[in-house]
Image: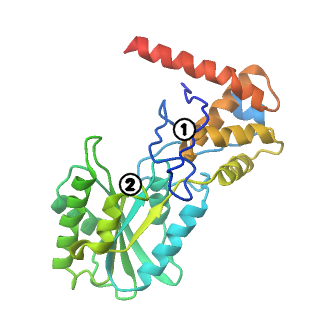
Amino acid sequence: MTYSPRFVSPKRDARRAPAEIIDDGYHSSPSATVQPLPPEVLQHWGLIGSPFAPDRALDTPLGVTDFYFRSSAHASACSWLQSLVIGPGSLAVVTASKGAGATTWLRQLAATSGLGGTALETAVARWENESLEHLTNTLFRLAGDIESKANVKTLWLIHATTGTQSTPVANINRLALLAGWHAARAERLQNVHMVVVTRGKRSLSGVRVFQTSPELRMPTHHLSRPHGSELRRCVNAAMHHAGGTRPAFTVSAVTHLAESSGGSIRRLGALVHTALVHGQIAGIRQITRADLSAPLINHAATVDESCSRAA
């Protein structure tokens, strides 16, 4: 089992959008992968399970014991969606900052049977390089008969993922294609709400196109990364959820973990698990900021060096 996240302080950017902890150029390096903690680590910290759930595919629901932190951004997105599904069928777009937890948010929505007073039947799918026909056929199959349930609306959740070479213009063209398909079938889809979640900055020019171009005029929302205070609460809540009865981290250590996550809860989970593993190995009973400063950075550097040699 390899734990490799590096602790770094996020660089401040005066141009960052409001409510973002750092700019949207953030990339976790190395990649943040949450892995379950081994039994000896759980025993050392008095935990009954791992604080953070391991990474899962989009169509795999969270387990009943998995921890989910509902950030203010997630709560705001749910409120926006709740007001949307009250009305007639629609096509909407959610842009998500990297590390905002879009996949987790979609997974939570896919498991719901309603929002507010609106009963929903959900279907979720990834849209990568598949044709539009393949995507819509998949959603029709997952959602069942969308025309026979007058009292239950259908929510199609589409996670649009593109390659690293993709451009904002290409993303907009794909959405324009989907908008045209939706407009041609508006009467049949009057009970269906389609929500496309795609990577994008709050200030992405494409978002303005969605709001001003007649053929792309659609409701939009932005899912941003959590604030530092939320990330600190997330660490404490995750440890409590895992059965912790004593503080495994000092206040300053929790702050350092939150700062090092760059606003990503997934990366935060990887860092917390890394710290717990090394704390158990070192026989530490409570992890301080100083405990995070040297051993874990050295460990991450060693892993990076080994990976470079292997390559």
Residue for badge 1: 34
Quadrant where the image shows the N terminus: top right
Q: Can residue 115 be seen at all in this image of the molecule?
A: yes
Q: Is residue 169 above or below residue 299?
A: below
The amino acid pointed to by label 2 is Gly
Q: Are marks 1 and 2 in contact (CB under 8 Å)?
A: no
Mark 1 or 2: the one toward you: 2
Marking on residue 200: 2
How crowded pointer 2 is (Cα within 10 Å; few <14, some 14-19, many 20+) is rated as many
Distance, label 1 to label 2, CA atoms, is: 24 Å
Residue 137: x, y in percent?
20, 64
Residue shown at the point (43%, 59%) measured from the top left: 202
Q: Is residue 125 left or right of residue 227?
A: left
Marking on residue 308: none
- Applied colour scheme: rainbow
Residue 83: x, y in percent?
47, 80
Q: Is residue 94 left or right of residue 168?
A: right
Element under disc 2 = loop
Quadrant where the image shows the C terminus: top left
Residue 101: x, y in percent?
50, 53
Element under disc 1 = loop
Q: Is residue 107 above or below residue 255?
A: below
Count of residue discs:
2
**Relative to the observer, which residue lies in front, 120 or 161?**
161
Q: Is residue 264 left or right of residue 157?
A: right
